Image (spheres, helix red, strand yellow):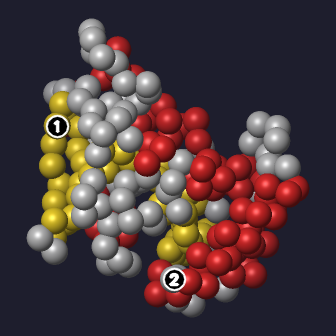
Amino acid sequence: MTEKKLAGDIENELLKTLKTRFDEYPERHQEINWQEVQTELTAHPEKLWSLNEMELTGGEPDVIKTEDGSFIFMDCSAETPKGRRSLCYDQAALDSRKKHKPESSVKATAEKMGIELLNESDYKYLQTLGTFDKKTSSWIETPEDIRALGGALFCDYRYSTVFTYHNGAESYYAARGFRGKLKV
């Protein structure tokens, strides 16, 4: 595999996995045609690379809607992806830690993967398609005014309700990661 492009066998295996997931959860993408999705994916190898990164880190990406003529994929794993936990929010938060620094930050990891963090609206929409984060939580895109004061936002699903909370951006927990989205 070269950077941002998958080898043919890995690409084929990923497309097979995505198609299987597409067929298994039709309620997530009513009125979306898989062949159209696959055509777009194969035309954009860098997007397939990003989806593979989502898959490798446990995100179980699935196409969940169309927006402005594009297909939107989101992490649909039952809990926040295992391969993206124990991260503080951004580089400034990582730099501020004197001891016990996490491996990286949410923002740096998402950028490296070529995906975006879900915002609060995205997270709430995702919860209309299933039940996610019953035992974990997920950092979400945080407004600049909150971040400027040292905070960051995260969401979870408890008591049949989506909750949005705040924490210091430098904090990190084994049960908190992040969910991403990718526009294709």
Which residue is disc 1 drawn over? Answer: 167
Q: Quick one: SS at disc 2?
A: loop
Disc 1 marks a residue whose amino acid type is: Asn
Q: Which residue is mark 2?
A: 25
- Quarter-wise, where is residue 146 in the image? top left
- The residue under label 2 is which amino acid type? Tyr
Query: Which residue corresponds to the image point at 75% horizontal and 81% vertical from the top-left?
Result: 35
Instruction: Assign the C terminus to one quadrant of the image.
Output: bottom right
Residue 161 seen by the camera:
yes
In the rendered image, the quadrant that contains the N terminus is top right
- Residue positioned 15% across, 49% down in the render: 165
SS for tag 1? strand
Q: Is residue 67 above or below residue 56?
A: below
Task: Find residue 130 and report its horizontal and vertical position in percent.
Answer: 35, 77
Residue 169 placement, left or right of 61: left
Q: Residue furthest right?
A: 8
Tell which residue pokes out farthest to the left in this image. Answer: 159
Of residues 22 and 44, the one nearer the viewer is 22
Across and down, in percent, residue 99 comes to: 27, 11
Up-down relation of residue 177 to residue 33 (above or below): above
